[in-house]
Every structure is written in C-alpha cells, then in structure tokens.
C-alpha cells in the first residue's frame, strides 16, 4: 500500500529533501559501523525525557546531553526496517512539500516538526529513560503537509489517512497496556508530529496556496 510515486510535477528539484535523505543515509551507515558501540551512541544522541527534565531541574546535566538530542535523534534509526520506510516516505512526500514551501521554509518545517514530535513524546512519558530516535515524527509532519496541500491525490491521501489511524491505534494501545512500557509511548510522537504538521503548514505555506481544510485559494477578480 506504499505509494511509490505520484504524478504531480516537481520543479525545481527538492535539494533540501535530497540532502536530508542523504544525511540520514550517511548517519545510518555510521551507525552500522559502530557495531557493539551503537547502544552507547543511541544513549548519547537519542532524546531521553528523563534527562531533559534533569537539565531544567539544575541537576548538572549538560545542554548537549539533554536538549541537543531533540535534533540529533532525528537522524538516528534503530534498524533497516525503521530506516527504509522512513526514507521512502520522505522521498515520496517531502519533495512536493518543498516545492510549495521553498527550501528554507521546508527545512524549518521539517526540523520544527521533528523537535515538536520529540516534545510531545516528552509530555506523554516525561520520566522515560528510553531514547527516542528516528525521523518518524518529522516525516509524519511532512505527510500532514502533503495531505493538506494535495487532498486530490486520492491514493496518497488514502494511504496517509490509513497510516494515521494505525499510529493512533498503536499509541492508544501503548497508553492502555502496561506490557508495552514507556518505549511504546513513542507512537504518540508519530501522532503528535502529524497534528503539528497540520498546524505548521498553515503558518509557513504562502498565503495564495489552498490548504485542506481551513484555507481556500483566493478568487481572482473577474476580467471584463
């Protein structure tokens, strides 16, 4: 059910999106080279809510250890099954969103969506010592933007709606089930990233762009 491509014209090339994908590939290759040292790197570069709380409680936790992982965690992935779908979704949906926003706004949108998703994970599980890693929150925001910008793309829209419903189901199950532990709360980062994306696209998209469901394309004055 993965929409491998759509027929929307894409020009100019989405250079920022390509750079994000390339950076993720390079970081994942670096992770593979770490071998048994990978868990330690994840602990350092992944976002840990409990450590984030400790920074603001003046416990001596460094800014680079507590806050910077909100960014660095966006480029880490746990395994190939985590990495490849994320890059596939980013390639399919990100380029079209960059076409509309432009390179600068798209980069701001992507990073803000990812950081915001991490903060939503923090709100759901503030005492968690489990590192949050992956681009899923940022990509969920990108998918939300695509959904708002191109609702007429029926297959892509159906895929996105199904994806969101599954994320919400898994997130609700994680919240209700003690067996999943705090690690399962990361599903809320996906849901939160999507909801945040719906808001951000309305703040960053050019005013002339039609968005679903809140903004209509301005009507042109009649020509005599």
Image: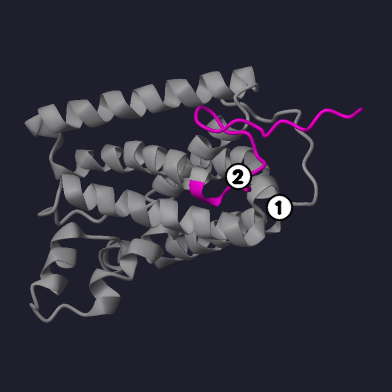
Residue for point 88% across, 29% down: 223
| Residue 222 inside the magenta-drawn segment | yes
Would you say residue 49 sits in the magenta stretch? Answer: no
**Which residue is tagged 1?**
14
**Residue ID at (48%, 65%):** 30
- Left or right, 122 with reference to 151: left
| Residue 46 percent across, percent down from the top left | 30, 61
| Residue 20 seen by the camera | no
The magenta segment is 203-224
Instruction: Provide residue 64's location: percent of width, then percent of height.
Output: 29, 77
In the rendered image, residue 208, in percent from the top left (x then y), is placed at 67, 42
User: What secondary structure is the stretch in magenta mostly built from?
Assistant: loop
**In percent of the image, x 45 and y 59: which residue is there?**
75
> What is the crowding at mark 1: few (fewer than 14 residues within 10 Å), some, or many (at least 20)?
some
Rendered-image quadrant of the C terminus: top right
Residue 9 in view of the camera: yes
Look at the numbered discs 1 and 2 and tell me whether their residues touch, using CB distance below 8 Å: yes
Q: Mark on residue 94?
A: 2
Q: Quadrant of residue 62?
A: bottom left
Name the colour scheme: one colour
Residue 137: horizontal and vertical position, in percent?
A: 39, 46
Distance (Cα) linking label 1 and label 2 = 8 Å
How many marks overall? 2
């Amino acid at each position: 059910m993965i929409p491998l491509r759509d027929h929307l014209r894409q020009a100019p090339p989405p250079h920022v999106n390509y750079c994000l994908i390339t950076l993720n590939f390079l970081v994942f290759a670096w992770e593979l080279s770490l071998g048994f040292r990978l868990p330690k790197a994840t602990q350092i570069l992944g976002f840990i809510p409990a450590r984030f709380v400790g920074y603001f409680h003046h416990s001596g936790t460094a800014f680079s250890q507590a806050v910077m992982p909100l960014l660095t965690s966006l480029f880490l992935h746990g395994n190939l099954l985590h990495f490849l779908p994320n890059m596939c979704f980013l390639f399919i949906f990100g380029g079209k969103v960059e076409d509309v926003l432009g390179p600068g706004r798209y980069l701001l949108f992507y990073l803000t969506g990812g950081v915001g998703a991490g903060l939503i994970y923090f709100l759901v599980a503030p005492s968690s010592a489990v590192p949050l890693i992956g681009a899923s929150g940022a990509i969920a925001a990108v998918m939300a933007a695509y959904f708002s910008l191109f609702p007429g793309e029926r297959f892509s829209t159906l895929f996105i709606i199904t994806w969101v419903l599954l994320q919400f189901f898994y997130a609700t199950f994680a919240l209700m089930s003690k067996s999943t532990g705090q690690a399962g709360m990361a599903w809320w980062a996906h849901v939160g990233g999507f909801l945040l994306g719906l808001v951000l696209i309305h703040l960053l998209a050019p005013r002339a762009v039609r968005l679903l469901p809140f903004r209509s394309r301005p009507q042109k004055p009649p020509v005599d």
